Image (cartoon, grey):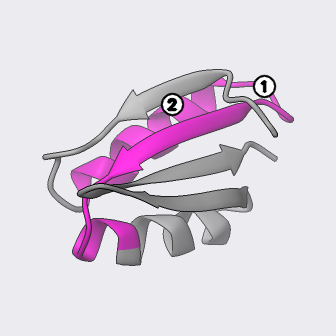
């Protein structure tokens, strides 16, 4: 299993701020590093992963946990 280099808890953060915070964190990271984010159900999980993919990064995994989602992203 791939381990995250950094974890960001974005639960309770409204769209599009959760995407902005994810993007800022990815900009600080090196290519090949993994970022794990926690997102709320609904708009957050529906919009952030596709937006990250559009930025050129790879979604490695999405897991539904009780009440939220864990998303693992590889910076490209």
- Badge 2 local density, few (<14 within 10 Å), some, or many (20+)? some
Outermost residue, front direction? 66
Outermost residue, right direction? 32
- Badge 1 local density, few (<14 within 10 Å), some, or many (20+)? few
Q: Which mark is residue 25?
A: 2
Image location of residue 18, percent across then percent down: 30, 49
Is 27 magenta? The answer is yes
Position of residue 44 in the picture relative to residue 62 (left or right) = left
Residue at 71% across, 35% down: 34
- Quadrant of image for the N terminus: top right
Q: Is residue 30 above or below residue 35?
A: above
Residue annotated with mark 1: 30
Occupied quadrant, residue 67? bottom left
Q: CA distance from mark 2 to mark 1?
A: 10 Å
Position of residue 44 in the picture relative to residue 15 (left or right) = right
Residue at 43% across, 65% down: 48
- Which is more N-terminal, label 1 or label 2? 2
Q: Is residue 48 above or below residue 23?
A: below
Residue at 86% across, 35% down: 32
Over which residues does the magenta segment extend?
Answer: 16-45
| Callout 1 secondary element | loop
Q: Is residue 36 above or below residue 16?
A: above
Occupied quadrant, residue 58? bottom right
Q: Which mark is residue 64?
A: none
Position of residue 70 in the picture relative to residue 47 (left or right) = right
Image location of residue 62, percent across then percent down: 57, 62
| Callout 2 secondary element | helix
């Amino acid at each position: 299993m791939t381990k995250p280099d950094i974890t960001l808890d974005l639960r309770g953060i409204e769209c599009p701020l959760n995407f902005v915070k994810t993007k800022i964190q990815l900009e600080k990271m090196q290519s090949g590093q993994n970022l794990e984010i926690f997102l709320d159900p609904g708009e957050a999980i529906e919009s952030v992963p596709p937006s990250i993919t559009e930025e050129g990064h790879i979604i490695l995994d999405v897991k539904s946990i009780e009440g939220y989602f864990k998303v693992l992203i590889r910076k490209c």
